[in-house]
Each structure stands twice: as C-alpha cells, then as structure tokens.
Image (cartoon, helix red, strand yellow):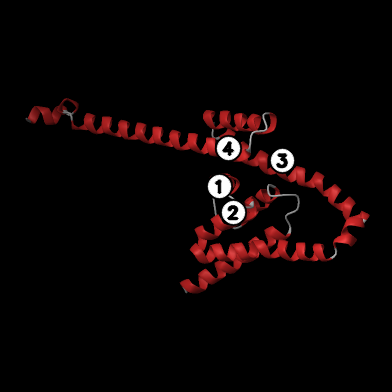
C-alpha cells in the first residue's frame, strides 16, 4: 500500500514539474509564481515559509531556478527517487522545444508573428513576477518582522539600485539569518535556565521552605 502511494506521488511530481517547465516563459523567476501555485496552494506539498526558503536556495545554488526548486521539493517528498523524477520532468520540455526551434531556427527568426508574440508576452511575464513578489513580500510584512522588512528593503536597494550580484545578496541575508537564529536560540536557553533556577529556589516555594 505504501509502495503504491509512493508511486502515485512520484507520478504527480513528474506531471507537476512537466507542466511547470512546459508553460514557463520569460525566464527563471516566472516559474516561482507557478511553483507557489502548484506546490503550496494546490498540492500543499510545502508551506508558504518553506517556499520563501526554496526560492532563496534555488537562486543561490548553481543551475536554473526551475531545476533547483524541483529537486528540493522532489527530495522532500520521495527522497532520491523524487529528485530524479522531478529533474526528468523539468528538463524534458525545454529539451524538446529547443530541439524543434534549433531545427527550424531560420523560420522562427524571420517569422513576425512569433516575434510579436514573444514581445507581447513580456508584459504578462512582468505581471506574474510582480504578483508573486507582492504575495511573498506581504507575508513578511504581516509577520511584523522588523529585521526581515529592513533586509527586504536593503536587498531591493542593493539589487536594483546598486546592481549587486543577487547571489551575494542571498548569501549575506542567509548568514544574517543564521546569526539571528543562533542569538534567538541562546536567548531561549538563557530564559529557560532562569526559569529553572527560579523554580528550584526554596524561597520561591514557601510551603517547601517551611517544611524544611
């Protein structure tokens, strides 16, 4: 039974990644919107917060965002088998499409219909990227995380105005996140130790102190 369930999950991973890779036009960031819709909203494979982490990992890792994201989700769901299926589902569409285009390159290059179609799609691509950026940024604002909001603004300035490489921005934000997590962890341990010490002090337990 468990084996049959895993097979169905693998098939669903393959179909989903095949769909994402087939209908993603306009660059790597466009797929983030479709990934969120499929992985988070429809299939509920990952949570919204995990989607943010997935995008950060996919962007900072070598290779296309689509493949890196598919690998992460595939591995989480079905281990190495899920990873392999996700990779195959992701690379088949571009492989087939590029093969056809390269074979008919001269016809595509001089075809005004295709040229106008691709130019018109740029507006749709921009809207899709803006939509997913708004959704993911809104979640950070709703959490009222002042440091997160500050770094979101700083990352935008560094990327758009200062034109710093996105990889460096992601790495710096990741390091800051690690340091922040360690500080919060230490504060949590310190607070717990204080409570334990307070509970173990006879002065805080009058009945016990009186019996002694």
Q: Residues within 10 Å of mark 4 (few under 14, many from 20)?
A: few
Residue located at (54% from left, 52% from top): 46
Residue 131's label in the rendered image is none
Whole-percent x and y of residue 88? Answer: 62, 65
Residue located at (14% from left, 29% from top): 207
Task: From the image, tell me which residue sits under label 4.
Answer: 168
Residue 192, quarter of the rendered image:
top left
Q: Is residue 93 left or right of residue 173?
A: right
- N-terminal of the two: label 2 or label 1? 1
Residue located at (51% from left, 38% from top): 174
- The nearer-to-camera label among 2 and 3 is 2
Q: Residues within 10 Å of mark 3 (few under 14, many from 20)?
A: few
- N-terminal of the two: label 4 or label 1? 1
Residue located at (59% from left, 50% from top): 62
Label 2, secondary structure: give it: helix
Q: Residues within 10 Å of mark 2 (few under 14, many from 20)?
A: many
Looking at the rendered image, the quarter that the C terminus falls into is top left
- The nearer-to-camera label among 3 and 1 is 1
Whole-percent x and y of residue 141? Answer: 59, 33
Q: Residues within 10 Å of mark 1 (few under 14, many from 20)?
A: some
Whole-percent x and y of residue 109? Answer: 88, 56
Q: CA gap, disc 4 to disc 3?
A: 22 Å
- The nearer-to-camera label among 4 and 3 is 4
Task: From the image, tell me which residue sits under label 2.
Answer: 68
Residue 57's label in the rendered image is 1
Residue 132, quarter of the rendered image:
top right
Label 4, secondary structure: give it: helix
Task: From the image, tell me which residue sits under label 3.
Answer: 130
- N-terminal of the two: label 2 or label 3? 2
Label 3, secondary structure: give it: helix
């Amino acid at each position: 039974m468990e084996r049959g369930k895993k097979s169905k999950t693998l098939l669903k991973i393959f179909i989903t990644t095949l769909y994402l890779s087939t209908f993603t036009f306009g660059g790597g960031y466009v797929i983030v919107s479709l990934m969120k819709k499929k992985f988070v909203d429809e299939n509920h494979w990952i949570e919204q917060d995990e989607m943010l982490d997935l995008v950060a990992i996919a962007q900072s890792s070598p290779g296309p965002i689509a493949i890196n994201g598919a690998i992460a989700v595939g591995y989480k769901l079905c281990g190495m088998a899920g990873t392999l299926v996700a990779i195959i589902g992701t690379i088949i569409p571009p492989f087939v499409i590029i093969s056809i285009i390269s074979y008919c390159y001269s016809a595509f290059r001089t075809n005004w219909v295709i040229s106008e179609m691709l130019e018109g799609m740029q507006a749709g691509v921009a809207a899709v990227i803006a939509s997913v950026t708004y959704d993911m940024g809104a979640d950070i604002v709703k959490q009222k995380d002042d440091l997160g909001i500050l770094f979101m603004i700083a990352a935008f300035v560094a990327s758009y105005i200062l034109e710093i490489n996105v990889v460096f921005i992601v790495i710096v934000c990741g390091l800051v996140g690690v340091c922040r997590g360690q500080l919060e962890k230490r504060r949590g341990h310190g607070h717990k130790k204080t409570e334990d010490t307070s509970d173990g002090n006879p002065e805080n337990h009058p009945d016990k102190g009186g019996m002694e």
